[in-house]
Image (spheres, rainbow, N blue to C red):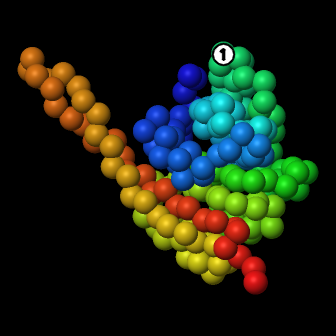
């Protein structure tokens, strides 16, 4: 998978994030801030339709190359800034946000467009706090999970572990909003 600054999402984090989204075979899913497309490619095996969105040209290039390498045909790649690019999408069943630029506007747009779960990954505690507060104010915060992964590596003919930066996985459910 091609490397782009800020990506790809580590496989362990992707597994937890996708489990929180709980994709089904009929779902329409958006990956906002798709980076290298790793989440989109994994989601394509679980959902009916996937939209991979990023504002960075290098991310779109990497995503397209990785989708082609994975031989996946259910992903539509969109180059543009969220929230405006979300206007033209059909109603969504769920969404993943891997980038936090314009996060409040993106969450406001998704609150109207998504009829299910929204999962956001954040690496900074201030960003996680802001996302949680925004989801709470909008009435669809469900939970936050702090994940710390350590991976093995060889050390002096033995095995040691090196930590990977922790990630906050914030889950909202727009089905909680309403009467």
Does residue 16 sit above or below 58 in this rendering?
Answer: below
Q: Is residue 53 visible?
A: no
The quarter of the picture where the C terminus appears is: bottom right
Residue 122 location (% of width, % of height): 50, 55
Q: Is residue 74 visible?
A: yes
Label 1: which residue? 69
Relative placement, left or right, of 128 versus 2 is: left
Q: Quadrant of residue 150?
A: top left
Does residue 65 sit above or below 83 in this rendering?
Answer: above
Relative placement, left or right, of 24 versus 143 is: right
**Which residue is most to the front?**
25
Does residue 177 sit above or below 103 in this rendering?
Answer: below
**Which residue is most to the bottom?**
179
Relative placement, left or right, of 48 versus 147 is: right
Judge by depth and name the residue closer to the eye, 64 or 91: 91
Residue 19 location (% of width, % of height): 53, 47
Residue 149 location (% of width, % of height): 33, 43
Q: Secondary structure at mark 1?
A: helix
Residue located at (72% from left, 39% from top): 25
Q: Quadrant of residue 131?
A: bottom right
**Which residue is most to the right?**
88
Residue located at (60% from left, 50% from top): 22
Residue located at (65% from left, 46% from top): 23
The quarter of the picture where the N terminus appears is: top right
Q: Quadrant of residue 139?
A: bottom right
Few, some or many residues within 10 Å of mark 1 (<14, 14–19, 20+): few
Judge by depth and name the residue closer to the eye, 30 or 4: 30
Residue 89 location (% of width, % of height): 87, 50
Numbered label tally: 1
Residue located at (68% from left, 44% from top): 24
């Amino acid at each position: 998978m091609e490397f782009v600054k800020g990506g790809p999402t580590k496989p362990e984090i992707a597994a937890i994030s996708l489990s929180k989204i709980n994709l089904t075979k009929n779902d329409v899913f958006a990956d906002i801030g798709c980076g290298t497309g790793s989440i989109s490619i994994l989601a394509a095996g679980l959902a009916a339709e996937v939209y991979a969105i990023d504002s960075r040209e290098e991310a779109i290039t990497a995503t397209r190359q990785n989708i082609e390498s994975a031989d996946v045909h259910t992903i539509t790649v969109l180059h543009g800034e969220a929230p405006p690019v979300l206007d033209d999408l059909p109603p969504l069943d769920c969404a993943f946000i891997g980038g936090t630029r314009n996060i409040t506007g993106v969450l406001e747009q998704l609150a109207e467009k998504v009829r299910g779960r929204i999962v956001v990954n954040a690496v900074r505690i201030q960003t996680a706090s802001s996302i949680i507060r925004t989801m709470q104010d909008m009435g669809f915060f469900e939970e936050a999970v702090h994940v710390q992964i350590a991976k093995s590596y060889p050390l002096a003919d033995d095995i040691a572990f090196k930590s990977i930066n922790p990630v906050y996985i914030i889950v909202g459910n727009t089905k909680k909003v309403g009467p």
